[in-house]
């Protein structure tokens, strides 16, 4: 019975995590509005089978889902350090800049088992953590369960069926079906339609050998939410204002909808001839298309209501600003939201040949990823062991843009919407209809071979592990369109293969003073493969690369100490330091000084982050537990990066090498000071109650490197305005109170579990989730001189009070 | 239990889907213009003769759009015309040819707006700003007083001899010809932007058989600014203006919409 209650409590605890998860916004950083195409945080986890023994610190557990009310990056570190593995295959190193959170959340929901570790796993190491998904059907306890969920965030209704068992003769199966649908209760325009299914089959030959097959598919689409200027929130009186939707034939239509249909298949063979020796071979194939819709227009004004010219704060004429402010405050949806009828009107009546001036587009990525991995584990009687293996992967991602809806027009032209130039000189004059490709079409191809290994030695209370990995990786762009602005090999065909040699070395030492009193020290160094979009100045269009493509170097260390406090508690402390160098980043944006679209290449980016994390847990009564955590750190640029600006259309160098004065600025919106208190109480009759308070401070808007270049600073009208460019806005401290109640019981021979969670109990609507500085600048003339001032930052707000209830039946 | 599972599965399929599925709209789905005019454009010449004037009455006028900014010769404004006269709407926006294409019927609610006069043309703007009327500046503000109909009618240009041009015709689409470019006039419509020179407006004089002269004024930002002015006899169609287009002397001038206005 105690085990069952423990399991139920675990379910509740993880369930709270689900409540805490928040849909991040469509735009998380400045610059390119499309950079965050596929971002989704892990919104779920393995509800029933998550193991407890993952050595998570109190702070790590609390922060994994708790800080959903603020932009949060673990330890402020580059997201490349968050590793996701399945049977030795690495699923986290994607072609794109952003982690594929959609894949992670799907795996989390569908994989038979998962765990997060902070120590090396089978030779794989990450300074942050490694999420390991187990696809063996036998890793799931046999049984059937069904869950119904009511949610107010992102979706309304969720249903899940899981079943697992043994078929006899060494055959095991595990299957999951899940659906989530409905409109967000708080944010207009946000919705989810997601259907997921997975099947895992395993054949075991005695205990030594097994063959597993895991397939999953998760077709889903989600309406997104955008960040905007504070003025729009103030004028609408709604901090959850979403500029992406508009009324369409009496219904809400979102212009930004993300779709994902990328099935994954994994086959894994494992053989363990002895207790100290095992072999594992795995192969995975992932394919399909993921995309995000948007609006395109040519020779017409922006249809987005929060475009700067549609906001009163950007109007020079006070009368116009006042009148426009009145219209915004009146709540007229033709002003505050996307006016779909206006776009239809223009297409129906204002074109000569039926060509579209407004249309909905879809930016697609067709994924084609094949991986093979072989992992060997060996051990010996005297404590020495080794893990080693190889991993091969081939990625071919086809990026292309399609017409999603012509909005009443007959066709669109395959021309650059901004310049009007031919998008594909090899097929000039082509017109496109719904579903046709236009504007760009290219592949990013990556091949990688990795050899990795580690040696570990345990002697008594001591343990040490030394390991490393070295890879050979090639990356190239292959353009399928020959652009008019840069024709020939500059845009068409292969860019040529760039070769990189990422590597990693780590050392982990451990000493156990007692079973619950121990210290772990880690040190690591390495070089990471740069992202494709940070190597090419404008990968959508051209083969031109940045001047000096290179890997990002990283070096760091951490120490983790745990100390039992008397018989009732435990104290935990961790400290970390990390430095990265030679990072590159390319931002595509409209430059108000050059009055054209530009590519800003930032190289020699150096960042350093350090911090401490403290935790204390006290079992102050048999059924009452209190936890307190505190973390403080610093996530800053360590030096001034080099900035080069080129004309996006011609790649003419407009600014050769300027230093952006970023040194000392915080590079992320993630809080640098956090604290949490959690109280849990369980009754003998399987009631569970919890209340937590979470606090985040020292948060800043993400800085924009353009503002801090000499060229821009020279454009300020006064020393005060120059300071405005340099100043980094600090976001107010944020805190929430969350509560939850659970009850487990038996009914008609079935285990029933009911939970209700309330996030942000006090209903605070003024919590800024995050923000970023825009690239645009206001231009005006002062004393006959053209001067510039920064655009206001864009923000997103956290959810107010929301409820999540679930009912699970298991038998 | 099986029944429950089947029931839930059916609910799953039945309740979901359709959040991003929309049928196309047609012209019939767009809002209709129901307001009726109670004044004609000619009556507006009584307003704002000396200085811009705010309309206090509940005046509603209609007109058909006669100009557009597709070629860049008209800047942030458009002209409407009815059987009695014409007016310029100082929209203060770009890409107006997508908003009010040529020939489109519009209905304008004038109460609270300002009417003024510039180059002989009745101008309608958001408010009175001294002698001038101010631009609306933002589409949302213009939408508040301007209704766009789905009806179209391309106004027939008013054919007139130069000698008979009258200031009350200003703002109307006028056709004049045959005329011939005067020898002393420049060979190009205007000075377009080049690597070394900023765009400059140009004035070209044309003379008819009776010896009367009319000017054609062209913006340096017009697509056809650098085009050659025909030296042959031509017929010109354009919006009629009356202002200081000949040095300090006021005279009549046409503002062309595109090169097809030269026949």
Image (tube, rainbow, N blue to C red):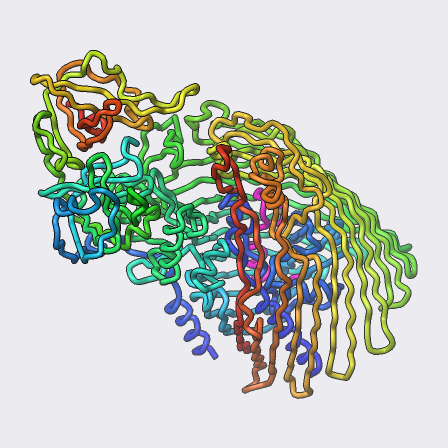
* Magenta span includes B51: no
Task: Work out whether residue A93 or residue A188 is closer to the camera in this orientation and state it.
Answer: A188
Q: Position of residue A474 (x, y in %)?
A: 62, 33
Q: Position of residue A186 (x, y in %)?
A: 47, 67
A748 vs B85: above or below:
below
Horizontal placement of A315 versus B250: left or right?
right
- Tell me where residue A331 sits by quadrant: bottom left
- Tell me where residue A395 sits by quadrant: top right
The answer to whether residue A219 is seen in the rendering is no
- Residue at x 18%, y 16% (from the top left corner): B181
Horizontal placement of B223 versus A593: left or right?
left
The answer to whether residue B99 is seen in the rendering is yes
Span of residues in magenta = A92-114
Report the quarter where the C terminus of chain A lies: bottom right
Q: Position of residue A480 (x, y in %)?
A: 45, 31
Report the residue that reaches farthest toward the front: B50
- Residue at x 56%, y 48% (from the top left corner): A773
A600 vs A388: above or below:
above
Task: Work out whether residue A510 or residue B154 is closer to the camera in this orientation and state it.
Answer: B154
Q: Position of residue A510 (x, y in %)?
A: 86, 57
A506 vs A158: above or below:
above
- Residue at x 77%, y 73% (from the top left corner): A617
* Magenta span includes A113: yes
Horizontal placement of A623 versus A542: left or right?
right
Total number of numbered discs in the rendering: 0
Report the quarter where the N terminus of chain A lies: bottom right
């Amino acid at each position: 019975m105690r085990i069952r209650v423990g399991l139920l409590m675990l379910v509740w605890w993880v369930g709270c995590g689900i409540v805490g998860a928040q849909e991040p916004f469509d735009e998380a950083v400045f610059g390119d509005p499309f950079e965050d195409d596929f971002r989704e945080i892990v919104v779920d986890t393995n509800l029933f089978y998550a193991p407890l023994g993952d050595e998570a610190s109190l702070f790590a557990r609390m922060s994994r889902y708790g800080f959903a009310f603020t932009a949060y990056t673990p330890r402020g570190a580059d997201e490349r350090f968050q590793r996701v593995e399945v049977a030795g295959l690495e699923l986290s190193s994607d072609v794109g800049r952003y982690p594929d959170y959609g894949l992670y959340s799907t795996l989390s929901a569908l994989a038979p088992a998962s765990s997060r570790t902070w120590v090396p796993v089978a030779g794989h190491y990450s300074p942050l953590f490694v999420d390991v998904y187990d696809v063996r059907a036998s890793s799931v306890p046999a049984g059937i369960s069904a869950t119904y969920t009511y949610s107010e965030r992102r979706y309304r209704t969720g249903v899940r069926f899981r079943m697992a068992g043994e078929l006899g003769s060494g055959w095991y199966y595990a299957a999951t079906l899940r659906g989530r649908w409905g409109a967000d209760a708080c944010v207009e325009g946000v919705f989810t339609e997601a259907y997921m299914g997975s099947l895992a089959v395993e054949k075991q030959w005695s205990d030594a050998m097994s063959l597993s097959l895991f397939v999953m598919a998760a077709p889903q689409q989600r309406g997104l939410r955008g960040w905007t200027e504070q003025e729009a929130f103030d004028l609408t009186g709604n901090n959850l204002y979403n500029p992406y939707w508009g009324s369409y034939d009496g219904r809400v239509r979102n212009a930004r909808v993300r779709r994902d249909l990328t099935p994954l298949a994994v086959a894994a063979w494992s053989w363990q001839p002895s207790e100290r020796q095992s072999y594992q071979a795995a192969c995975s194939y992932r394919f399909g298309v993921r995309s995000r819709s948007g609006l395109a227009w040519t020779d017409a004004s922006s249809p987005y209501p929060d475009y700067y010219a549609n906001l009163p704060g950007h109007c020079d004429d006070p009368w116009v600003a006042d009148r426009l402010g009145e219209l915004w405050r009146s709540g007229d949806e033709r002003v505050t939201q996307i006016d779909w009828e206006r776009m239809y009107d223009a297409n129906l009546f204002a074109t000569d040949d039926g060509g579209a001036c407004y249309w909905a587009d879809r930016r697609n990525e067709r994924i084609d990823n094949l991986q093979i991995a072989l992992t060997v584990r060996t051990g010996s009687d005297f404590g020495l062991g080794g893990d080693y293996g190889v991993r091969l992967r081939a990625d071919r991602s086809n990026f292309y843009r399609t017409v999603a809806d012509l909005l009443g027009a007959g066709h669109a032209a395959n021309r650059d919407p901004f310049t009007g130039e031919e998008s594909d000189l090899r097929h000039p004059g082509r017109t496109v209809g719904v579903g046709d490709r236009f504007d760009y079409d290219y592949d990013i191809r990556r091949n990688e071979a990795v050899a990795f290994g580690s040696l570990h030695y345990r002697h008594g209370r001591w343990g040490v592990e030394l390991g490393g990995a070295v890879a050979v990786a090639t990356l190239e762009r292959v353009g399928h369109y020959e652009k008019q602005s840069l024709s020939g090999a500059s845009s068409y065909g292969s860019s040529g293969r760039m070769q990189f040699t990422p590597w990693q070395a780590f050392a982990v030492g451990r000493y156990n003073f007692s079973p619950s009193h121990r210290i772990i020290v880690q040190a690591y160094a390495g070089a990471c493969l740069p992202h494709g979009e940070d190597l090419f100045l404008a990968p959508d269009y051209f083969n031109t690369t940045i001047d000096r493509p290179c890997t990002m170097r990283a070096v760091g260390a951490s120490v983790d100490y745990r100390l039992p406090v008397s018989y009732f508690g435990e104290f935990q402390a961790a400290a970390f330091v990390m430095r990265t160098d030679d990072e590159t980043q390319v931002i595509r944006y409209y430059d108000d000084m050059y009055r054209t679209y530009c590519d800003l290449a930032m190289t020699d980016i150096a960042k350093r982050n350090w911090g401490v994390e403290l935790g204390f847990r006290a079992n102050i009564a048999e059924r009452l537990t209190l936890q307190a955590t505190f973390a403080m750190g610093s996530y800053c640029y360590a030096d001034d990066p080099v900035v080069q600006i080129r004309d996006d259309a011609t790649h003419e160098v407009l600014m050769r090498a300027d230093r952006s004065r970023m040194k000392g600025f915080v590079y992320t919106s993630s809080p640098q000071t956090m604290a949490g208190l959690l109280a849990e109480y369980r009754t003998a009759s399987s009631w569970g109650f919890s209340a937590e308070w979470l606090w985040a401070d020292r948060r800043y808007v993400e800085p924009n490197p353009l503002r801090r270049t000499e060229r821009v600073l020279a454009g300020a009208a006064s020393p005060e305005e120059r300071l405005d460019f340099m100043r980094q806005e600090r976001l107010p401290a944020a805190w929430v109170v969350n509560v939850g109640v659970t009850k487990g019981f038996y009914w008609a021979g079935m285990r029933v579990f009911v939970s209700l969670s309330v996030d942000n109990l006090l209903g605070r609507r003024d919590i800024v989730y995050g923000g970023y500085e825009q690239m645009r600048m206001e231009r005006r003339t002062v004393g006959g001189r053209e001067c510039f001032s920064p655009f206001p930052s864009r923000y997103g707000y956290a959810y107010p009070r929301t409820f999540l209830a679930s009912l699970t039946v298991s038998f | 239990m099986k029944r429950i599972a089947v029931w839930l599965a059916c609910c799953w399929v039945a309740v979901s889907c359709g959040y991003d599925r929309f049928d196309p709209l047609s012209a019939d789905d767009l809002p209709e213009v129901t307001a009726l005019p109670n004044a004609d454009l000619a009556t507006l010449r009584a307003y704002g003769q000396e200085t811009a004037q705010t309309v206090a009455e509940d005046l509603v006028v209609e007109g058909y759009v006669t100009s557009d900014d597709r070629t860049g010769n008209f800047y942030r404004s458009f002209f409407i015309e009815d059987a009695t006269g014409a007016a310029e709407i100082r929209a203060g926006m770009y890409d107006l040819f997508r908003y009010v294409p040529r020939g489109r019927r519009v209905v304008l609610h004038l109460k609270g707006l300002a009417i003024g006069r510039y180059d002989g043309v009745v101008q309608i703007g958001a408010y009175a700003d001294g002698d001038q009327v101010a631009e609306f500046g933002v589409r949302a503000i213009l939408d508040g007083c301007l209704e766009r109909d789905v009806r179209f009618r391309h106004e027939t240009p008013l054919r007139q001899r130069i000698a008979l041009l009258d200031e009350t015709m200003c703002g109307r689409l006028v056709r004049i010809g045959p005329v011939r470019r005067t020898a002393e006039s420049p060979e190009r419509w205007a000075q377009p932007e080049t690597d070394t020179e900023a765009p400059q407006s140009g004035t070209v004089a044309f003379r008819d058989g009776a010896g009367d002269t009319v000017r054609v004024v062209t913006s340096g930002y017009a697509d056809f600014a650098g085009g050659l002015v025909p030296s042959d006899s031509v017929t010109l169609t354009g919006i009629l203006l009356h202002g200081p287009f000949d040095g300090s002397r006021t005279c009549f001038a046409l503002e062309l919409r595109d090169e097809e206005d030269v026949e």
